[in-house]
Amino acid sequence: MRWRTYAGRGIRLDSQVIENSLLAAVPRKAYQRLHAALEPVELSFGEVLYEPGDTIRHVYFPNDALVSLLTLADGHLALEVGLIGREGMVGIPLVLGHAQSAVRALVQGGGAAMRMAAAPFRKEFALSPPLQKELYSYTYTLMAQISQTAACNRFHVVEQRLARWLLMTHDRVKADRFRMTHEFLGHMLGVRRVGVTKAAQALQESGLIRYSRGDIIVLDRKGLEAAACQCYQVVRDMHDG
Ligand SMILES: [Zn+2]
C-alpha cells in the first residue's frame, strides 16, 4: 500500500504498490493482517529513531527513507555499522526477543516509511510463520552486513569504503542523486572531514560522481563498483541469495 502525507493528511495513491520489499515479500493474506497496524510516516534527515538502551516503541519499514545503525564508542564517537532501506526493517531486536536497541538508529536519508507499534508487531510476528521467515532471513543478511562492515572499517581505505557506501545508498534510494553532507559522511565512515573531502575528490576526478555542497550525483555506476572494495559485492550476493 502506497501512501503519501500531504498537509498532514494521508492520501492513498495506489492500493497495489508495496514499496518496502520485505513487506512486499510477505504473502498477501499475511500482509493484510499486518496492514491494519501499519501507519505511513515521513522520516526526516537527522532524526534519531532509537538511542542505545532505548526501548523500541516502533518498527519501521522504509520505502525511500534510509536509516543508519551507528555504534557508539566512549559515549560520543559514532561509526556506521549497518544501513537499512527499502529492503529491510528497523527494529530487528524485537524479532530476536529483545525490547531494547543496542545501537543508534539515525535517519540519514529523509523519506517515507511504514511504522508499526511494538505490541501489535510482536503479536503478528508470533502468529505469522511467513513474516517470521522473511524477517529471520533479513536478520541473517543484516548480521552479515554488520560483520562485513567491521572488517571493512578496519582493512579498507576511505576511498574504497566511500565507493561502497555510495553504492549501498544508490541501491536503496533508486535515484542517481541524493544529499549527504561531509560531516555526516565523516560519521558514516569514521574519518575526519578532510579524509572525506580527499576520497570524494578522487572519485570525482575519476568521473564516477559529482559532489558539490552535499549534493551527490552518481555518474558511472560500473566505475564505482570497480572502485569499491569487495565488501559491497559480498553483502549484495548474500541479499540476492
Ligand atoms: Zn570493504
Image (cartoon, rainbow, N blue to C red):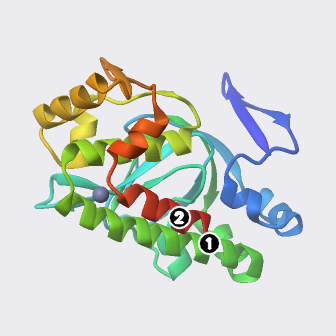
Q: Please provide percent x and percent y for residue 157.
A: 18, 50
Sequence-wise first label, 2 or 1: 1
User: Which mark is on residue 215?
Assistant: none
For label 2, count other residues whose C-alpha is less than 10 Å away and answer few (under 14), some (14-19) or many (20+).
few
Closer to the observer: label 2 or label 1? 2
Q: Amino acid at mark 2?
A: Asp
- Residue linked to disc 1: 135
- Residue linked to disc 2: 237
Q: Amino acid at mark 1?
A: Leu
Residue at position x 44%, y 64% in the image: 234
Q: Out of 2 and 164, give the one closest to the viewer.
A: 164
Which quadrant contains ligand 1? bottom left
Q: Please provide percent x and percent y for residue 134.
A: 67, 72
Q: Secondary structure at mark 2?
A: helix
Work out how far the residue at label 2 is from the one at label 1, CA to CA, in angstroms: 18 Å
Residue 138, quarter of picture: bottom right
Q: Please provide percent x and percent y for residue 156.
A: 21, 56
